[in-house]
Each structure stands twice: as C-alpha cells, then as structure tokens.
C-alpha cells in the first residue's frame, strides 16, 4: 500500500470513542465480541468544537481496496509509536446505517484485557481532510476513558502531510459545494447525462433555424428593395440622377451600408439636373468622371482618410469635397 502522510492536524487519535459493550453481565463482557462498532455515521462534533464526517461505505471500500488488516492496540500505542503491539486484527469491515463495524480476530492479550474490563472503549485513529472528512482508518485502540472526557480530544502525528479529498475536485467541477458527497455528485452527473438532446431533435432544430434565417433574409431583402425603389424613383423624379445611372445606384444599395451612403449622397445632390443626352444609354463606364460608383468610392476613401487624422465627417461632406476637387 502507498505510504499515507498528513499534516499534524489531519490524523486523529481518540476523537471518537465507542463503548465496546453497552449492556450485559460481567460474564458477557468477558467474552471478546466478534464484531465491534468502530465509527458512527455522519457528522460528529467534538468537545472542543471541531467536527468530523464519517462515510461508513467509503471507509469500508478503502479497507477492501487496501487489502490490509487493521491492528487493534492499547491506548493508541501503534499510532503514537509508543507500544507498537497489536492485541487483535480487524479482518473485515461492514457499513451499516448507524456507522462502520469491524470483525476482529482477537489475540490472547486482547481477550485478557477485555476479560479484565480495564479498557472498555473503542477509539479509532483515522486520517482526514481539512474539512474533517475521514479518508482511511489507521488503527483502532482499546482505551479506558471516553474521548469526550479527555482534556485533549485529538493528538497529532509528527510525520504528516495534507491528504486531499478527490470528491472535492469532482464536486467543484460539477458546480457543487465543496461539502457535496458522492450521492450529490452522482445526482448531478445523472442530470447532465439525461439533459443531452437527441440527434434527430438537434437536426430538426437546425433545419427550422436555417429556414427561419432564410425567410428573415428574404423579408429583409424585399424590404430593402422597396426602400431602394422609392429612393431612386424619387431621385429620378427630382432629376438628381439620370435614368442611365439608376442601375449603378441600385447596385450600390445592395447592402444596408451602401443604401445609407447612396441616400446621403442623393440628399446632398441638388434637384433639376440639365438634360445630359444619356437617356438612351444603358450603362456608364466606371472610369468616367462623375460616375456615381467612382464618386462614392472617392468620398468613402476621403472619409476614411479624415477619420485616420481624427476628423470625423459624414458622407455628404465627403461627397461635396470630392466634387469640389474634381
């Protein structure tokens, strides 16, 4: 088994004491019991205000995993390295609703102590986390005085290091409190697994979302076309543009940003253009001076140039500047 270490406050001797027999005649007390109660279940508060948490099932599982018998000694002699002699060995552990029990193979020295009734209480030595949760059992002692009557309820081992509770990390990963037990973690994991969406439902949702997105895009495009038509027809009526220029302006209005720029450009254009002789033309060269595409590009470039200098102008001002500079 891997050597276990803990800090001076993480191994407890005699913090919890259980009487080895609660009733019976002297003859019955003399008989060494096969099964003894080692620890109670749940939280136990000590006389000086500290508390410990005992998970009987987890402790029994740790014992079974280690596969090593637990010694029973006198007055914690083994854990304190005072009188390291066993008077019995715990061969089996069982978790019950009220606590942890152990089946003891008593040696003759242990039977003699029980027969003499000089030590009537069971006192375990166990490692625990900073939160007080017992993680594994080191040994069990026969003692004369109950722990709650002792001036010091727990003593320190000089060779130790903190042992982390692995369940704490799992609880934190699940978003639970650090005091969440194994049952709470399992419940959270089950909730996560049952919360998964079936693939068919997921695919159906994606299909509906795609259809809705396409429908929204179509409605938006239809709405913009209506606005573009109203803008350009109005510009034609006010003679701000020539019929041959309409297709160019419509292309510029293909996006919301382009529509806003054309709207600003036409807003800054005076009404009543003189006849240009372009009514019969269907296209206009992009390189031709005064072409709206070129004019818009130059105005946008000038606006960006000024913005880089920290000067913010609107598109109408940029158009006027470009027109003025030819």
Image (cartoon, rainbow, N blue to C red):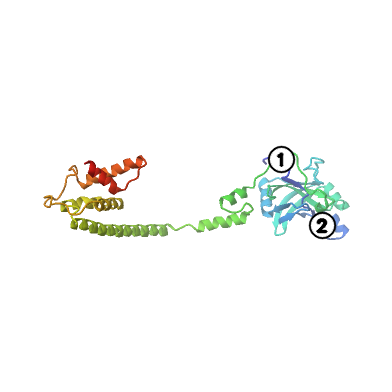
Disc tally is 2
Pinpoint residue 269: horizontal percent, then vertical percent.
23, 51
At which x and y percent is residue 278?
A: 13, 50
In the image, 280: left or right of 226? left
Please tell me the numbered disc located at residue 21: 2
| Residue 27 x %, y % | 87, 58
> As rendered, which of 264 and 19 lies closer to the eye?
264
Is label 1 in a helix, a strand or a loop?
A: loop
Is 58 on the left-hand or right-hand side of 312? right
Q: Where 306 falls versus 231 (above or below)?
A: above
- In this view of the protein, which residue sits in the foreground, 312 or 115? 312
Location of residue 238 (image quadrant)? bottom left
What percent of the width, then of the height, locates residue 81? 79, 40
Q: Earlier in the sequence, mark 2 or mark 1?
A: 2
The quadrant the C terminus occupies is top left
Q: Is residue 133 or residue 285 the one in the foreground?
A: 285
- Which of the 4 quarters of the picture holds residue 187? bottom right
User: Residue at point 20% right, 50% down?
Assistant: 248
Residue under the point 29% across and 48% down: 315
Binning the other alpha carbons within 10 Å of mark 2 as few (below 14), some (14 to 19) or many (20 upward) gives some
Q: How many angstroms separate mark 2 from mark 1 (CA)?
A: 33 Å
Q: Report the disc number at residue 233.
A: none
Q: Nearer the viewer, residue 134 or 279?
A: 279
The secondary structure type at the circle numbered 2 is: loop
Is residue 139 visible to us here? no
The residue that appears at 65% across and 45% down in the rendered structure is 164
Residue wearing tag 1: 160
Q: In which quarter of the image is the N terminus?
A: top right
* Category of crowding for the residue at label 1, using alpha-carbon neighbours closer than 10 angstroms: few (below 14), some (14–19), many (at least 20): some
């Amino acid at each position: 088994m891997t050597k276990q270490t803990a800090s001076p406050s993480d191994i407890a001797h005699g913090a919890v004491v259980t009487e080895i027999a609660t009733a019976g005649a002297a003859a019955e007390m003399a008989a060494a019991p096969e099964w003894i109660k080692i620890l109670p279940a749940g939280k136990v508060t000590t006389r000086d205000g500290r508390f410990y948490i005992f998970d009987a099932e987890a402790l029994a599982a740790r014992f079974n995993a280690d596969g090593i018998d637990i010694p029973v000694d006198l007055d914690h002699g083994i854990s304190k390295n005072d009188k390291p002699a066993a008077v019995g060995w715990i061969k089996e552990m069982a978790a019950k609703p009220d606590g942890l029990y152990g089946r003891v193979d008593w040696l003759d020295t242990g039977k003699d102590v029980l027969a003499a009734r000089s030590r009537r209480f069971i006192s375990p030595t166990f490692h625990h986390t900073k939160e007080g949760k017992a993680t594994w059992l080191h040994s069990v002692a026969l003692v004369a005085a109950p722990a709650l009557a002792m001036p010091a309820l727990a003593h320190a081992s000089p060779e130790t290091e903190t042992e982390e509770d692995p369940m704490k990390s799992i609880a934190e990963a699940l978003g639970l409190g650090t005091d969440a037990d194994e049952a709470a973690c399992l419940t959270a994991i089950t909730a996560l697994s049952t919360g998964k969406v079936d693939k068919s439902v997921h695919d159906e949702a994606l299909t509906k979302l795609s259809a809705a997105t396409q429908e929204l895009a179509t409605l938006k495009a239809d709405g913009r076309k209506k606005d573009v038509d109203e803008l350009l027809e109005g510009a034609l009526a006010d003679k701000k543009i020539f019929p041959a220029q309409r297709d160019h302006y419509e292309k510029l209005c293909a996006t919301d940003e382009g529509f806003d720029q054309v709207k600003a450009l036409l807003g800054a254009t005076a009404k009543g253009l003189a006849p240009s002789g372009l009514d019969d033309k269907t296209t206009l060269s992009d390189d031709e001076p005064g072409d709206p595409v070129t004019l818009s590009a130059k105005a946008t470039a000038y606006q960006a140039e000024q913005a880089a200098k920290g000067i913010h102008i609107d598109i109408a001002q940029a158009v006027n500047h470009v027109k003025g500079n030819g």
